[in-house]
Image (tube, rainbow, N blue to C red):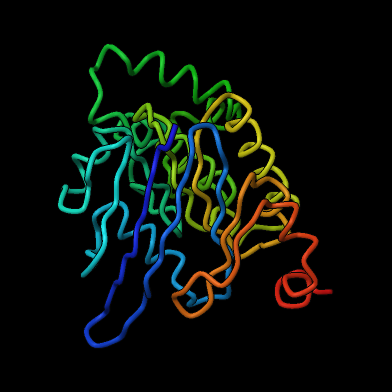
Amino acid sequence: MEVLKVDNINVYYGSIHAIKGVSFTVNEGEIVTLIGANGAGKSTILNTISGLLRSRTGSMQFLGQPIDHIAPHKLVGMGLAQCPEGRRMFLQMTVQENLEMGAYTQSSATIPGGLDNVFAKFPRLKERRKQVAGTLSGGEQQMLAMGRAMMSNPKLVMLDEPSMGLAPILVEQIFDIIKELHAAGTTILLVEQNAAMALEVADRAYVLETGKIAMSGTGQELAESPAIKQAYLGG
């Protein structure tokens, strides 16, 4: 089943044409990744899907429903969750309070089960559930951001640069968690500068260059592409 369909979107920042005729799909149960250099437009695409930016053309559908003019908070209620670049915690609130904020579109009766689910996937967060989020490490904050997204019981999770600023060992941990979420049936749209890690976990991938899709294929196909190796994989 097609969870997300993006068709010919064009996004501008003033007179700057940032996203140029981009189209792609995400099917149920897939990890689809968008890779590309810094400034290629990856985060802009996620922010357009989630309603923070608007496309001048084209259309977007989520679970078969048009979402071009739906407010961001209503999209969360429909099952579309974004884990933003830079984590963006409520720094003065505890870990548990941050997670509970992620469930604001859900019935309060679902919160205990949601917390149990998140704590099973992120045992570190359970240990720190009463700790103020601003005192967590970068890796712990990324886990919290992902857990908060999961609290909305999403049909699609969009992860924006989950490895940014993390030490290599923490990057490995974050991608192990992404694999676990995928194995549990979560559909994921992943934006990531670490192309090697992204292609390793992706079912399908799209390469963005200056706001346009330059290449697409399976994660394995692109990982083995000489052009991709030279441009993104250091070989």
Left or right of residue 109: residue 177: right
Q: Quadrant of the C terminus?
A: bottom right
Q: Position of residue 176 (x, y in %)?
A: 69, 39
Tell me if residue 158 comes above or below residue 97 in the rendering: below
How many discs appear?
Answer: 0
Tell me if residue 63 comes above or below residue 225 in the rendering: above
Pick the residue in front: 145 or 150.
Answer: 150
Left or right of residue 165: residue 235: right
Q: Position of residue 95 (x, y in %)?
A: 42, 35
Tell me if residue 131 comes above or below residue 35 in the rendering: above
Residue that appears at 71% across and 60% down? 222
Left or right of residue 102: residue 225: right
Residue that appears at 37% across and 66% down? 44
Pick the residue in front: 189 or 134.
Answer: 189
Residue that appears at 53% across and 25% down? 126
Residue that extends furthest to the bottom in the rendered view of this protein: 15
Q: Position of residue 229 (x, y in %)?
A: 78, 70
Residue that appears at 37% across and 14% down? 112
Q: Quadrant of the N terminus?
A: top left
